[in-house]
Structures are given as C-alpha cells and as structure tokens.
Image (spheres, rainbow, N blue to C red):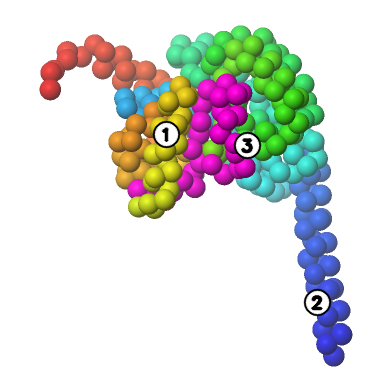
Amino acid sequence: HAKSAGRNNFQFFAAAMNKRVCEHLELENRLRQALARDELSLHYQPQYDLASGRLSGCEALMRWHNPVLGQVPPDKFIPIAEDSGLIVALGEWALGEACRQVMAWHAAGLPLLPVAVNVSAVQFRHADLAGQVARALRRSGLPAQLLELELTESVLAENLEQIGATLQRLKRLGVRLAMDDFGTGYSSLSYLKHFKLDTLKIDRSFVSDLPNGDDYAALTIAIIGMAHSLGMTCIAEGIETAAQHDFLRWHGCSHGQGYRLSRPLSAQALGELLQRSTAATAADAAAPRLST
Ligand code: C2E
Ligand code: MG
Ligand code: MG
Ligand code: MG
C-alpha cells in the first residue's frame, strides 16, 4: 500500500516537473522570437531628487507582450533569458533602445534625461558589453554621462579580473555605474570604492519596512551615510508610502523611486511627464521669490 502511494506521489511529482519543464521550454521558445516579432518594449520609471522633488532621471524596464501568453513579467522571463543566453541579445537591444529614446525625447524639444539600464551578470560573462555600450552611444548620440548601468552584486561573484577590466572600459567610456538591489547579495563593501561605482540603490526590501522596522531603519540610515560619505548618489527603491518618502528625505537620501512617486511609464507617458515637469520648472524659475 505504502509502496503504491509512493509510486503515485512520484508520478504526481514527475507530471508536475514535466509541466514545469514544458512551460519553461515554451517560454524560452517564444522569447527566442520576441525580438524579431517586435514584442518587447521598454517602460521608464521616473527617479526624483528627494530634496527638490524634481525629476532627475529614469530607469528603463523591459516589458514583453506575447499574443498568446499576454504580458509576461520580467521576474519570469529575465531568468529564462539569462539561462538560455538570450539576455545577451535582449540586453543589447535594451541598451540601444533606451539611448535612442532619450535622444528622441530631446529631438522633440524636451530636456536630456539621464537613463539607467539594467545589466545582467550574464552580459558581463558572455558579451562584449563595453563594445555594445560604445555602439549604443555612438548610434544614438547620447552623451555617455547620461547613461547609467545598473549591476547587481552577483556580477561581483564573477571572475573579478575580467569584471574589473570590463568595468574599467565602461568607466573610460564615461558611463555611470550603479549597484542595484543593494543589501540583498553577498556584498563586500570594499568593492563600492574599488570599482568606482557612482550610485547605490537601496533595495526595496529595506524601504518596505520603513519607518517602523527598527533594524531596517537603522540599516537604511547607515547605508545612506555610507553612500554619501563615499561620494555616491543614493537612490531608495520601492517608495510606496508618504511615511517612507518622509523618512528617506528626512535622513538625507538624495534620490528616490517607487509607486508613491510614479509607476513605470510608457515612453509616450514619460515624454508627457517630462513636458509637464519642464513647464513647471520654468514657471517656478520665472515666479517672484517670496522669502519665508
Ligand atoms: P529592478 O532593476 O530592481 O527594478 C525595479 C523593479 O521594482 C521593477 O520591477 C519596478 O517596476 C518595481 N518597482 C518600482 N517601484 C516599486 C514600488 O514602489 N513597489 C513595488 N512593489 N515595486 C516597485 P519590474 O519592472 O517587474 O522588473 C523586475 C526586475 O527585472 C528588475 O528589478 C530587474 O532586475 C529585471 N529587469 C527588468 N528589465 C530588465 C532589463 O532590461 N535587463 C535586465 N537584465 N533585467 C531587467
Ligand atoms: Mg534596476
Ligand atoms: Mg532594484
Ligand atoms: Mg530587482
């Protein structure tokens, strides 16, 4: 009896496994066609200067809409793209598209907005990343200092000699480097200075517990202080509430991003936001100053 139950369990497990493998393969096969079929796009999440409340930049986030599967979230397709190596082509597309879009906004009379693009550890390992970045800049005409590459701590688990050489080439191009999801990986703080990273992004998991999670609050304050004393820009991710926003501003975090400030927007919607915020800034500058 026990034996047959075990066998049934195994069959159940095997069937479930099989289903997962099939789903994975289906996603991978459809993802393989996604670029050629024009199913990918970028959305842009605004980033703000917390002290002034001004728009300071944006982060490009990949979106995949497949006619059969519908909208597939990045947390589902990016890992598959990484395992299959497709991320090399997808990542190169994202770099080119983000640079092109900033110059398109600019050509429409809007100010040049800094843009951050996520880069996977696999792109460091397998691709001529610095070459791809150089091409994206050259083709679009985007000034290098307006492009920021967001790396995760997993990049630094790679062969450090090779990573160091690539990071140096990227710095020589003049692009900025950000550490994404800071605090979630196996990090050694010395790399922040060693690799001359420009920006530190405090992971959403810290921010989501503010202002009441005492340990997270203490850690967040320490991270803000460390980033600023290293001369780095500090961006808090995933700001969802007014209380979180106030806490971060109060503790001097220079920049922020999150649903409270804005969700990721289509290129069209971000263009409109840029237009409105430019008009507001101009009106602000023209208005007579009242002393308070
Ligand atoms: P990430 O780079 O840390 O991006 C931030 C994620 O948090 C985005 O999710 C964004 O929509 C979400 N987010 C922003 N504000 C809030 C908030 O207030 N609350 C909550 N709950 N979430 C917020 P998204 O777009 O689903 O992307 C997920 C992850 O997928 C990204 O995390 C990044 O690791 C990866 N990814 C997205 N686009 C690309 C890409 O072009 N290349 C690579 N390699 N990875 C990408
Ligand atoms: Mg990111
Ligand atoms: Mg992040
Ligand atoms: Mg993330």
Residue 228, quarter of the rendered image: top left
Badge 1: how crowded within 10 Å, few (<14), some, or many (20+)?
A: many
> Mark on residue 224?
1
Q: Position of residue 7 (x, y in %)?
A: 86, 79
The quadrant in which residue 180 appears is: top right
The reply to whether the C-beta atoms of the residues labelled 1 and 3 are less than 8 Å apart is no
> What amino acid does circle 3 point to?
Glu
Name the foreground residue: 291 vs 158. 158
- Look at 55% across and 14% down and name the residue there: 145
C-alpha span from label 1 to label 2: 51 Å
The verdict on residue 195 being magenta is: yes
Q: Nearer the viewer, residue 110 or 246?
A: 246
Give the structural element (helix, strand or loop) at label 3.
helix
Work out whether mark 1 precedes mark 2 in sequence or the reverse, and give the earlier one. Answer: 2
**Residue under the point 35% across and 52% down:** 212
Q: Which three-letter amino acid code belongs to the residue tagged 1?
A: Ile
Graded by Cα atoms within 10 Å as few (under 14), some (14 to 19) or many (20 or more), the crowding at tag 2 reads few
The residue under label 3 is 153
The kind of secondary structure element at disc 1 is helix
Q: Secondary structure at mark 2?
A: helix
Q: Position of residue 10 (x, y in %)?
A: 83, 74
Q: Earlier in the sequence, mark 1 or mark 3?
A: 3
The residue to which callout 2 is attached is 9
> Which residue lies at the image location 67% right of the left edge and 38% below the top edge?
154
Of the two numbered discs 3 and 2 on the same chain, state the one appearing first in sequence.
2
Q: What is the C-alpha distance between the residues marked 3 and 2? A: 39 Å
In the rendered image, residue 120 lying in the magenta stretch gets the answer: no
Point out the image quarter for the N terminus: bottom right
Task: Determine whether 15 is above or below 144 in the image.
Answer: below
Residue that extends furthest to the bottom in the rendered view of this protein: 1
Residue type highlighted by circle 2 = Asn
Residue 237: x and y in percent read 47, 38
